[in-house]
Image (cartoon, helix red, strand yellow):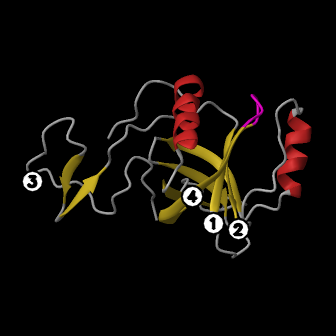
């Protein structure tokens, strides 16, 4: 099943439906409305989402080498860990290997930028979609899934840190809506 990396909606856009005014944050999609209030961006390589079943047990990674960060991540026993494909102020999308998740419900997400030793910890979220990714390689040794999540109930500090992360570590070319 092909997964679309560009939209949180589950239905394809119907061209015969009128579009909402630009900047309204809403558009008509099929019979439902998509509400995407924030632009999505690609983060630079080495950005990972780590889903935890409890508040993060990941230690402070500032000042750690890449190897030390890797070991700290493994020791924190994440429920899921995968590379972030895009991020916005309201959520993110990431790929993770199938079979690597622990089947435990995740409660928090940490965003880790390995190269810069930056970690945004304990962001509340809800899953929008979790689908298998068709990478065009039917006999690929590792199957991957894409999970799309929406941030919920972020604190003012978490919002500010997320904004700063997008401004300083994202490709500032917006992804197509």
Residue highlighted by disc 2: 53
Q: For this view, does 166 lie left or right of residue 15?
A: right
Q: Which residues are magenta?
A: 114-118
Q: CA distance from mark 4 to mark 1?
A: 7 Å
Other residues around mark 1 within 10 Å, as few (<14) / some (14–19) / many (≥20): some
Comparing 10 with 141, the one in front is 10
Q: CA distance from mark 3 to mark 1?
A: 37 Å
In the rendered structure, find residue 17 and report the number of the disc placed on it: 3
Would you say the magenta stretch is mainly helix, strand or loop?
Answer: loop
Q: Earlier in the sequence, mark 1 or mark 2?
A: 2
Q: Earlier in the sequence, mark 2 or mark 4?
A: 2
Q: Earlier in the sequence, mark 3 or mark 1?
A: 3
The reply to whether callout 1 and callout 2 are in contact (CB within 8 Å) is yes
| Magenta span includes 1 | no
Percent x, y for residue 163?
Answer: 51, 33
Residue highlighted by disc 1: 107
The reply to whether callout 4 and callout 1 are in contact (CB within 8 Å) is yes
In the rendered structure, find residue 124 and report the number of the disc placed on it: 4
Dot 1: element: loop
Comparing 99 with 76, the one in front is 76
Q: CA distance from mark 2 to mark 4?
A: 11 Å
In the rendered structure, find residue 5 and report the number of the disc placed on it: none
Other residues around mark 3 within 10 Å, as few (<14) / some (14–19) / many (≥20): few
């Amino acid at each position: 099943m092909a997964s679309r990396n560009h939209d949180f909606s589950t239905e394809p856009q119907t061209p015969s439906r009128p579009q909402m005014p630009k900047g309204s944050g809403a558009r008509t999609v099929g019979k439902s409305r998509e509400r995407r209030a924030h632009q999505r961006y690609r983060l630079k390589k080495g950005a990972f989402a780590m889903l935890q079943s409890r508040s993060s047990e990941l230690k402070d990674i500032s000042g750690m080498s890449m190897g030390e960060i890797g070991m700290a991540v493994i020791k924190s026993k994440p429920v899921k860990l995968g590379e972030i494909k895009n991020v916005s102020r309201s959520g993110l999308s990431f790929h993770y290997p199938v079979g690597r998740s622990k089947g435990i419900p995740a409660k928090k997400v940490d965003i880790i930028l390995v190269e810069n030793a930056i970690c945004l910890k304990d962001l509340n979220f809800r899953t929008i979609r979790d689908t298998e990714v068709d990478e065009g390689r039917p006999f690929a040794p590792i199957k991957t899934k894409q999970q799309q999540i929406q941030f919920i109930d972020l604190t003012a500090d978490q919002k500010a840190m997320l904004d700063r992360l997008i401004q300083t570590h994202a490709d500032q070319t917006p992804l197509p809506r």
